[in-house]
Image: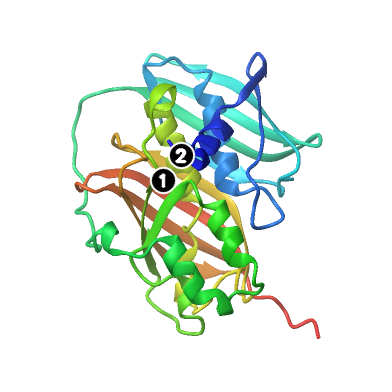
């Protein structure tokens, strides 16, 4: 594993400071707040630490309450809501400076055989045929608000190999398009050793799921996002359902759409597919999507 992937895995390896209480650090962020995917992933790690190994999370529902301070540790307090014969429920509150910034409820289930079906995977170009972030982002350097956005974005996503299967929002500012986005992603390196377990792969997918989910909202309105300066955005809530096993170090297709935007909020839906066509994860998020007012 390369150093940046090891750093991300270490970030998700929370410190236990008391029974059902954990502490995590933060990744340097492009924006002056903690990246939402990091908080969600760390909270899920904390919940998993209190559940027996035969049960994996099948869903999570969460709310972002306050912006996190990237310069301070985050404390995760886990409540053991219920331990049933088939299902387990946990609630996690993330606290900084004495205030809750995020809370998550997660449900776990023992494996069961039963009925099964799924939709057909959407078509997308092979990920190897698509430009890497290092190749793509510099093409649009003049589009961003500040010249240092490109190196900051590249550094923030260094552990994740993320490739757009369609043009990103910042590529076609002012041109409304279909409210649908697709990206391939995987960790930038193979996960090995003690980190190679199903919980880590689930938490890494949770981390990445907040990166591009609102892109489909921006595309519908020809907006480039906060990096361009034509939208102010933030995640409000985030829900995920884990359907089938997958590995985060193998290519996954993240297909998202946006059915509605209104009242300063946009709703985005996502599906994460394995390369061989299995629907692995479903995601829904609502976020703040505001057009900045002219302050002149």
* Mark seen at residue 146: none
Mark 1 lies on residue: 188
Kindly identify the residue that appears in the image at 51 percent across and 18 percent down. Answer: 82
Residue 19 locus on image (x, y percent): 65, 13
Q: Quadrant of the C terminus?
A: bottom right
Residue 151 locus on image (x, y percent): 59, 62
At label 2, counting other C-alpha atoms closer than 10 Å, the crowd grade (few under 14, some 14-19, many 20 or more) is few
Relative to 82, residue 279 above or below: below
Q: Are marks 1 and 2 in contact (CB under 8 Å)?
A: yes
Mark 2 lies on residue: 2
* First in sequence: mark 1 vs mark 2: 2
**Left or right: 40 with respect to 273?**
right
Kindly identify the residue that appears in the image at 45 percent across and 73 percent down. Answer: 219
For this rendering, which residue is in front, 275 or 296? 275
Examine the image and state in which quarter residue 107 appears: top left
Kindly identify the residue that appears in the image at 50 percent across and 62 percent down. Answer: 214
Q: Quadrant of the N terminus?
A: top left
Residue 284 locus on image (x, y percent): 45, 51
For this rendering, which residue is in front, 42 or 90? 42
């Amino acid at each position: 594993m390369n150093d940046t992937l090891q750093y991300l895995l270490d970030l998700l390896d929370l410190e236990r400071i008391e029974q059902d209480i954990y502490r995590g650090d933060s990744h340097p962020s492009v924006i002056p707040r903690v990246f939402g995917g990091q908080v969600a992933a760390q909270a899920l790690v904390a919940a998993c630490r209190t559940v027996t190994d035969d049960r994996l999370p099948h869903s999570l529902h969460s709310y972002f309450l306050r912006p996190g301070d990237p310069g301070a540790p985050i404390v995760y307090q886990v409540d053991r809501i219920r331990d049933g014969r088939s299902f387990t429920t946990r609630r996690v509150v993330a606290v900084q400076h004495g205030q809750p910034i995020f809370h998550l409820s997660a449900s776990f289930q023992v494996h069961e055989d039963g009925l099964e079906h799924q939709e057909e995977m959407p078509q997308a170009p092979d990920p190897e045929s698509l430009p890497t972030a290092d190749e793509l982002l510099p093409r649009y350097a003049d589009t961003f608000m500040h010249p240092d956005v490109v190196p900051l974005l590249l550094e923030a996503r260094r552990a994740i190999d993320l490739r757009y299967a369609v043009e990103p929002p910042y590529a076609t500012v002012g041109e409304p398009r279909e409210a649908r986005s697709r990206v391939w992603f995987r960790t930038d390196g193979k996960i090995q050793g003690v980190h190679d377990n199903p919980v880590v792969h689930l938490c890494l997918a949770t981390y990445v799921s907040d990166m591009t989910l609102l892109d489909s909202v921006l595309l519908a309105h020809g907006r480039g996002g906060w990096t361009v300066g034509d939208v102010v955005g933030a995640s409000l809530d985030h829900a995920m359902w884990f359907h089938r096993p997958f590995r985060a170090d193998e290519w996954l297709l993240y297909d998202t759409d946006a059915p509605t935007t209104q009242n300063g909020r946009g709703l985005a839906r996502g599906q994460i597919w394995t390369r061989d066509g299995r629907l692995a994860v479903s995601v829904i998020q609502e976020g703040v999507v505001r057009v900045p007012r002219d302050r002149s």
